[in-house]
Amino acid sequence: MVWDSLTQQARAGTLPHALLLTSDGPVRTPVLQLVAALQGCPVDAIDKGLHSDVLVLEDTGLQLRVDHTDAAKRDHQAITQTARGIVQWVWETHQSPARVVVLFAAERLNTPAQNALLKVLEEPPPGVYFLCTTTNEYQLLETLRSRMRIQRVSATPAVALAPCPLAEAFWRGDLFDRFAIAEQLHKAEDSSRQEVMAVLRWLLQQSKTSGRYAFLSPLQEAYKQCRESGNVRLHLEYLALQMV
């Protein structure tokens, strides 16, 4: 299978430094597994945004620009969600053998942003990998496509979620409901932090399954902070505001 072959290349250090993965549907899970093979770490660390040498740009449906413009700020995009921000990030010193940029739905790059990435794709810094996905490669400039190895891959089927009533209520509720759940989980924090983490894991998976990728970044941050014994209510209330 193609995914198995790519994973073997990642482990052997022979993976192309710029890959464009084309498919008819979602490929997030196998892409993150591929990144984990490159980094030699658990896929869970990649999935939850805990690896400092992996930059994952989720498919939020928003256009990606060259610079951190006022429009990008209005869309609540980070500097690393711009072409020049990506270039700056890949040139930073990294602790791991590899530094990986994962760009889902690469067709979201506008034309100036695509042009701004041409040089770094052609001559990436040592140990830097670009893994880009698309469902329509022809929405990308030919000059960009020519700098990546294009690989057709199979999409992955959606996985049913196990029931988690509190998480489901948080997902479907309004802001008032979510604040109430945050308070409930905060009170239970000392006796059952595992319940808090289970809720956040369910929300992370639901955001992927439903295609609500804009929620992934705040969810990953909440997961990281709560995992590190942060203030549960504070982080869940902030998460609730981000999910409005």
Image: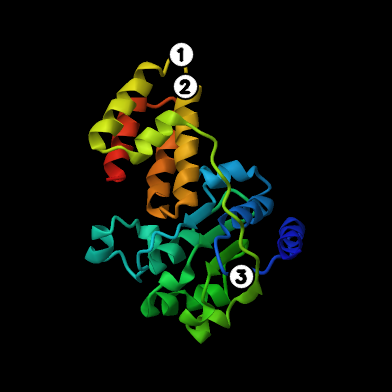
Q: Which badge, 2 or 3, comes first in the chain's sequence?
A: 3
Secondary structure under tag 2 reads helix
- Please, what is the three-letter code of the amino acid marked with disc 3? Leu
Please, is residue 97 above or below residue 229 in the view?
below
Q: Report x, y in % for residue 227.
A: 47, 30
Within 10 Å of the Cα at label 1, are there few (<14), some (14-19), or many (20+) other Cα atoms?
Answer: few
Residue at mark 3: 19
Disc 1 is placed on an element classified as: loop
**Residue located farthest toward the top when viewing the structure as drawn:** 191
Residue at disc 3, secondary structure? strand
Left of 78 or right of it: where is 227? Answer: right
Residue located 61% across and 62% down the image: 155
In percent of width and height, residue 41 lies at 65, 44
Q: Is residue 91 shown above or below 200?
A: below
Which residue, given by chain and number where applicable, does mark 1 sit on? 191
Per the image, the residue denoted by label 2 is: 193
| Relative to 142, residue 96 above or below | above
Q: CA distance from mark 3 to mark 1?
A: 46 Å
Q: Residues within 10 Å of mark 2 (few under 14, many from 20)?
A: some
Q: Nearer the viewer, residue 189 or 145?
A: 189
- First in sequence, mark 3 or 1: give its number: 3
